[in-house]
Image (cartoon, rainbow, N blue to C red):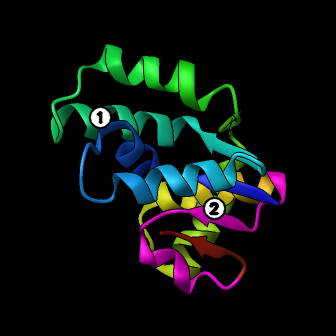
Amino acid sequence: MKLFLDACFLTYLNTCIQGDRASLDDLFKRILTEELYTNLLAVDETLYISMKKYKVPYEVTMSFFKDIILPHTQVIALDESDIENLKTYLEKYSIKPSDALHLSSMEKKGIRSIVTEDKVFEKVEEIQRVWL
């Protein structure tokens, strides 16, 4: 199965040291057998939120990506072709532009599942939300 990793999942994996840590690690271990994808927007969001909200230095988050995420995950490029999909998803679901871009990335690779805490994706009938 193909899975898209949303920024909230990546951020929690990068920053959580208590509470749901065991559940996050368990979910990550379970999905490692699947085809994992993300995009640069999710990377950007993870870097920003990890630094601003959780005070994790950029260097630590970059090491997290390099050593833990990227060996198992393909990064989907965003390009001009995403603009039309962005417009379609914004109009159809009234979601944030970043979420619409994630859906566009998923569409490019035929991905039907997203690993995310964000319940807004439940209103997108084309995909399934995977969470703890």
* Residue 126 found in image quarter: bottom right
The crowding category of the residue bearing disc 1, from other C-alpha atoms within 10 Å (few below 14, some 14 to 19, many at least 20), is some
Q: Is 69 placed above or below 105 here?
A: above
* Residue 54 found in image quarter: top left
Q: From the viewer's perspective, is 38 left or right of 53?
A: right
- Inspect the image, locate mark 1, and give the three-letter code of the amino acid beneath it: Tyr
Residue 89, x across and y down, in percent: 60, 71
Q: Secondary structure at mark 1?
A: helix
Residue 91, x across and y down, in percent: 54, 77
Q: Residue at x 65, y 38 (%)?
A: 78
Name the residue at the top extreme: 59
Q: From the viewer's perspective, is 131 left or right of 81?
A: left
Q: Earlier in the sequence, mark 2 or mark 1?
A: 1
Which residue was labeled with disc 1? 48
- Inspect the image, locate mark 2, and give the three-letter code of the amino acid beneath it: Leu
Q: Is residue 17 visible?
A: yes
Q: Is 96 placed above or below 101 here?
A: below
Q: Tell me the number on the disc at residue 103.
A: 2
Q: Secondary structure at mark 2?
A: helix
Q: CA distance from mark 2 to mark 1?
A: 21 Å
Residues shaded magenta? 109-125
Residue 70, x across and y down, in percent: 63, 27
Q: Tell me the number on the disc at residue 85.
A: none
Q: Which mark's residue is nearer the viewer, 2 or 1? A: 1
Q: Residue at x 68, y 25 (%)?
A: 71
Q: From the viewer's perspective, is 5 left or right of 127?
A: left
Residue 24, x across and y down, in percent: 44, 54
